[in-house]
Amino acid sequence: MARLHGAPALVAMALSLGLVATACAEERPAVTADGGGEDQGAEEQGTITIAGQEATNHGSEDVTGASEIEMEVDDFYFEPTVLEGEAGQSLSVSLSNEGGAAHTFTIDDQDVDVQLGAGESGQAEVTFPDSGALVFYCSFHVSGGMLGGLSVGGDLAAASGGSGGGGSGDQPPGPGY
Ligand SMILES: [Cu+2]
């Protein structure tokens, strides 16, 4: 009674294999944990509050009088995390993504939004606020504490010209937390 119809079954199998192969071709960013072993011991520096937002802290640097600075972008922090400068100071920031994920260096108020794929470098021009602190962040991982500040007079608490920040409506999906 019940008899297998061999040929149609084979055709169906071949079709579905083809579909699976196509579906798997979509690339997925790999998050690896090989981020430069040189600073393993200094990884844990806790968190710091910048203009009301909690940031993963990887140190501060006094950039007063400087026109250029290098900043490491990594999984999932900025180093240095806080730049201390003068009111209205202009600074050119050389960014290098040393992590395994894509990141951004974003300042809402200054139309700064530099995207950096893994291993990529970039450049951002920033201006220090008149007082207090201005937050920069990674739009992918800000909720995980990936942000930092431009601080004037060492003041991290007071937000300057803050538009609330903290996450735009349409964030691309990042690695889940
Ligand atoms: Cu990020």
Image (cartoon, grey):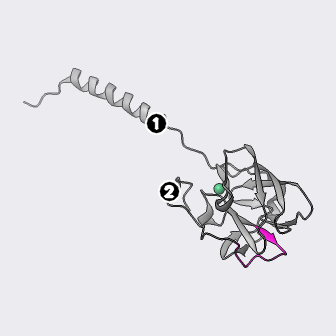
The quadrant where residue 40 appears: bottom right
Indicate the quadrant of ligand 1 in the picture.
bottom right
Residue that carries the numbered disc 2 in the rendered image: 170
**Which residue was labeled with disc 1?**
24
Q: What residue is shown at x 75% (from left), y 68% (from top)?
A: 57
Q: Main secondary structure of the magenta part?
A: loop
Magenta residues (range)? 150-160
At mark 1, the secondary structure is loop
Residue 23 coordinates in the image, percent (x, y): 42, 36
The answer to whether residue 124 is above or below residue 23 is: below
Residue at 85% across / 75% down in the picture?
Answer: 153
Q: Quadrant of the N terminus?
A: top left
Q: Residue at x 74, y 54 (%)?
A: 73
Residue 159 colored in magenta in the image: yes
Q: Residue furthest left?
A: 1
Q: Nearer the viewer, mark 1 or mark 2?
A: 2
